Image (cartoon, grey):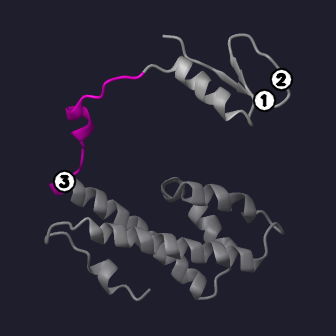
C-alpha cells in the first residue's frame, strides 16, 4: 500500500515521491487528498463496539487514581503549609510514577525547576493548576459511579 506524503511549503521545494501543496491553496489540498485516499465501507458492528472496564477492574483503576489524588494532595498541603513550591514540584517530578501519571504537566513544569529559572509566584501558579487538575480527576472518578463497596470517603470528606 502506497502512503501519500504531502509536502506543504510556500517556497516551491519539490521532493521526489511527495505531492507539493502550497499552504494557501485549499483546492489543491482537497484534490491531493481525494486523489490519494480511497473511501472504505465501515461495518456498523465495528463502530458500535466499545471496550470498557467494569466491576472489580473499574474499582482497581479508580483505587489507583484515588491513590494518585491522595499523593498530589499531600504535596499541595505541604505547599500550603509554607514549604517552597519549587521543593514540592521537584518532589512530584522526582517520583517517576507520579510524574509519568501527570504526563504533560510534569513535562512542562520540570524545566522551570532549575535554580533562578522561575520565581515563586510562577511555581505557585503551577501548584494551583495541579489542584484544579486533581479536582477534575476526582470529579471524573465520582462520575464513574463505582459500586457501593468502593470507598470514596477520602474524596468526599477531604477538606480541600
- Residue 114's x, y, as percent? 77, 62
- Looking at the image, residue 67 lies above or below residue 45: below
Q: Is residue 53 magenta?
A: yes
Q: Residue at x 26, y 75 (%)?
A: 152
Query: Which residue is disc 3 drawn over?
Result: 54
Residue 113 — which label? none
Q: Quadrant of residue 47?
A: top left
Circle 2: is it few (<14), some (14-19), or many (20+) Cα within 10 Å?
Answer: few
Query: Which residue is disc 2 drawn over?
Result: 12
- Residue 121's x, y, as percent? 73, 80
Query: Which residue is disc 1 drawn over?
Result: 9
- What secondary structure is found at the residue carrying circle 3? loop
Q: Are marks 1 and 2 in contact (CB under 8 Å)?
A: yes
Q: Using the image as rendered, state which of residue 55 and residue 45 is in the foreground.
A: 45
- Looking at the image, residue 120 lies above or below residue 48: below
**From which residue to which does the magenta span run?**
39-56
Amino acid at each position: 500500500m502506497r502512503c501519500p506524503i504531502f509536502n506543504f511549503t510556500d517556497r516551491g521545494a519539490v521532493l521526489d515521491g511527495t505531492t507539493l501543496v502550497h499552504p494557501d491553496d485549499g483546492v489543491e489540498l482537497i484534490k491531493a487528498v481525494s486523489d490519494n485516499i480511497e473511501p472504505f465501507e465501515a461495518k456498523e458492528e465495528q463502530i458500535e463496539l466499545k471496550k470498557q472496564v467494569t466491576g472489580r477492574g473499574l474499582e482497581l483503576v479508580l483505587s489507583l487514581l484515588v491513590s494518585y489524588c491522595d499523593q498530589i494532595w499531600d504535596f499541595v498541603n505541604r505547599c500550603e503549609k509554607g514549604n517552597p513550591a519549587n521543593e514540592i514540584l521537584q518532589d512530584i517530578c522526582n517520583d517517576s510514577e507520579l510524574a509519568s501519571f501527570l504526563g504533560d504537566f510534569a513535562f512542562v513544569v520540570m524545566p522551570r525547576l532549575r535554580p533562578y529559572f522561575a520565581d515563586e509566584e510562577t511555581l505557585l501558579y503551577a501548584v494551583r493548576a495541579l489542584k484544579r487538575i486533581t479536582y477534575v480527576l476526582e470529579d471524573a472518578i465520582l462520575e464513574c459511579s463505582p459500586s457501593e463497596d468502593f470507598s470514596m470517603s477520602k474524596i468526599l470528606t477531604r477538606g480541600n
